Amino acid sequence: MSRRIIVVGGGIAGLAAAHRLLELSQENNFGLEILLLEAGPRLGGSIHTERVGAFLVEAGPDSFISEKPWALQLCERLGLGSRLVSTNPTRQSVLVVYHGRLEPLPEGFLLMAPTRLGPLVTTPLFSWRGKLRMAAEFFLPRGGVGTDESLAAFVRRRFGREALERVVQPLIGGIYAADPEKLSLAATMPRFLEMERTWRSIIWAMWRAQRRRARRPESGARWSLFLSLAGGMQELVDAIAQRLPNDSVHLETHVIGLTWNNAKKNWIAATRSGEIEVDGVILAIPAYSAAAILSSVAPPLAQELREISYGSTATVNLAYRENEIPRALGFGLIAPAIESRKILACTFSSIKYPGRAPEGSVLLRAFVGGVLQPHLFEHDDRTMEADVCHELATLLGITAEPLFCRIHRHPRSMPQYHVGHLEKVERIEAHLKKLPGLELAGNAYRGVGIADCVHSGEEAAENLLRALEDGEAA
């Protein structure tokens, strides 16, 4: 018996879901008609690669993390293994804005914890009191168990205020464009919570992990922590789209509501051009969009989804001649909120990955907005470009006019995993169990990165097919 499934949303989660449905139907000889419905004019969501002459410009995410295997495994299944590129191993330094100047992040400082004593002692980023407070983490007892804690509260408790303000806030808060005072540690950085529970000291746990990796240099040596594709992240989008049947993708198709047909035990999806009867639905769209679609059929679920807030960010790509950059560049710079700069961070794209700029040129990518600076996202393009150029002049000494500037805005794109987020997700999943043939996917639930979104989409596909097979067996 052939079944029809619609995937609503053509971002990376929806694409991964549709692709996994196709894989599973072929592997198990399961008759399946897959429809991928995207409201916009193109696939990929925030992933979009633009060519500007010989420059490769990323509008959104420029990489994925290799420690989480799902995006890497998908690339390999798609035949993109030879297209993967690692980060530049020789220029990995990260700079931190400190009282208006740039200082290198101490070597061995990993996300929130120092793992090497020498660089911590010599860095000017922290006062002696702040350094002693961080070192004291080694001797602190475990925290309480059972309640969710904000990331900021955890870092202050373990490492002190200076560690939070000077490094952790711009590094981790920047990943989520978030306020670390509201960010759930359990939902965003659970491994640090587990380190505390298992080993008591985060520094000790990370030092042990480094020693294990040093004894086994062959493990994971093939790839760097962050990976991209030679032709940009658009290659991943295009490779999935090419695998899908020609008639399965429908652009500029808005799903405006769902209705459960109790007589036929299926769903009716309402679009602006008509209705579609389907056996299963995967909503791979922002939580607020899913809430609008589900508002009439599942009000409690829609309310939970509606309460997930979002931040907005913009990427500002600027190109320069190499001789116009007065200092050596590494991976990029981060700007702590206490510095009150008009950028969150800046990635030195053509240093980080090969093939991003022609010889003799440099491509930089600044990030603007986020939850802590929403007013900067609202600036028009001309003002935003001027703000970023002023910051680059002040921090890097770049006074030349850019060869070009490309601004890409991502409104309400970053879900905020506030304290209590995992409990909310559990309530959402409990509501879903009462709605047969319906799954949710995307970055609003259990991870915001590309690898997380791939996993979310594939898991939704697997859960849905399992439910359909169980229904047939019954």
Image (spheres, rainbow, N blue to C red):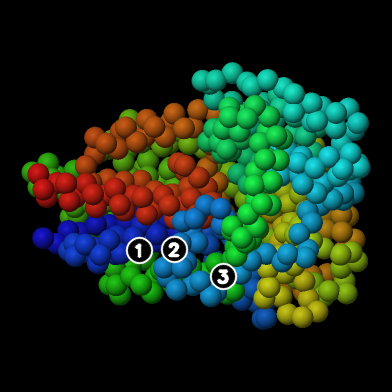
What's the residue at 73%, 64% (across, down)?
Answer: 89
Name which quarter of the figure residue 99 lies in: top right
Looking at the image, which is closer to me, 135 or 111?
A: 135
Q: Quick one: SS at disc 3?
A: strand
What's the residue at 49%, 72% (across, down)?
Answer: 80
What's the residue at 49%, 32% (across, down)?
Answer: 421
* Number of numbered markers: 3
Q: Residues within 10 Å of mark 3 (few under 14, many from 20)?
A: some
Depth check, mark 1 against mark 3: the one in front is 3
Task: Give the x, y percent position of residue 353.
Answer: 68, 68
* Amino acid type indicated by mark 2: Leu
Q: Is residue 15 left or right of residue 447?
A: left
Residue 255 in view (yes/no): no
Mark toward the start of the polypeptide (1 vs 2):
1
* Amino acid type indicated by mark 1: His
Looking at the image, which is closer to me, 216 or 136?
A: 216
Task: Give the x, y percent position of residue 260.
Answer: 19, 43
Residue 395 in view (yes/no): yes
What's the residue at 60%, 65% (across, down)?
Answer: 222
Mark toward the start of the polypeptide (1 vs 3):
1
Q: Is residue 99 left or right of residue 77?
A: right
Give the vertical position of 284 relative to 207 (above or below): below
Check the picture and name the quadrant holding the N terminus. Answer: bottom left
**Label at residue 84:** 3
Q: Quick one: SS at disc 1?
A: helix
Give the vertical position of 168 relative to 334 (above or below): above
Looking at the image, which is closer to me, 168 or 383?
A: 168
Looking at the image, which is closer to me, 291 or 105?
A: 105
Report the residue marked by disc 1.
19
**Label at residue 74:** 2
Q: Quick one: SS at disc 2?
A: helix
